[in-house]
Image (cartoon, rainbow, N blue to C red):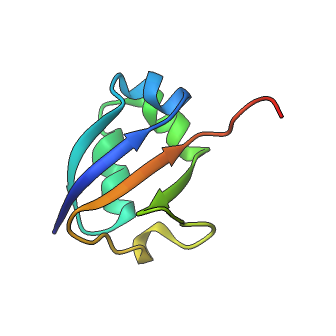
Amino acid sequence: MATGIVRYWAAAKEAAGVAEEPFEAATLAELMTKITSGRDALAHVVRRSSFLVDGNPVGLRAHETVVLADGATVEVLPPFAGG
């Protein structure tokens, strides 16, 4: 089980009610389950978001296969408007 920080940007930050929070999770999938439990607005945003783990894009990899290292930083990036 890794510990780290999850950072929320834009609509994810608004839905979470915080800019960042600590986490304990082994995979990105487990982390997403934990942070969205009882937070419907955040769950809605997370479904449409992309993710960086320690600055590296997750892309289309299955979240169950993204193993989190101790001290990891996970960034939740919702779709941004504008151009």
Which residue is outermost to the right? 83
Residue 55 relative to residue 22: left or right: right
Vertical side of 10 occupied by 52: above or below: below
Image location (x, y in percent) of residue 82: 80, 29
Give the number of marks: 0
Image location (x, y in percent) of residue 79: 67, 39
Image quadrant where one finds the N terminus: bottom left
Image location (x, y in percent) of residue 3: 18, 59
Residue 83 relative to residue 2: left or right: right
Vertical side of 58 occupied by 78: above or below: above
Q: Name the one closer to the observer, 21 or 65.
A: 21
Image quadrant where one finds the C terminus: top right
Vertical side of 51 occupied by 35: above or below: above
Vertical side of 5 occupied by 44: above or below: above
Q: Name the one closer to the observer, 30 or 81.
A: 81
Residue 3 relative to residue 63: left or right: left
Residue 4 relative to residue 8: left or right: left
Q: Name the one closer to the observer, 63 or 14.
A: 14
Q: Residue at x 39, y 54 (%)?
A: 74
Q: Residue at x 33, y 47 (%)?
A: 6
Q: Which residue is drawn at 53% across and 35% down?
A: 44
Image location (x, y in percent) of residue 35: 31, 43
Q: Which residue is drawn at 75% across and 30% down?
A: 81
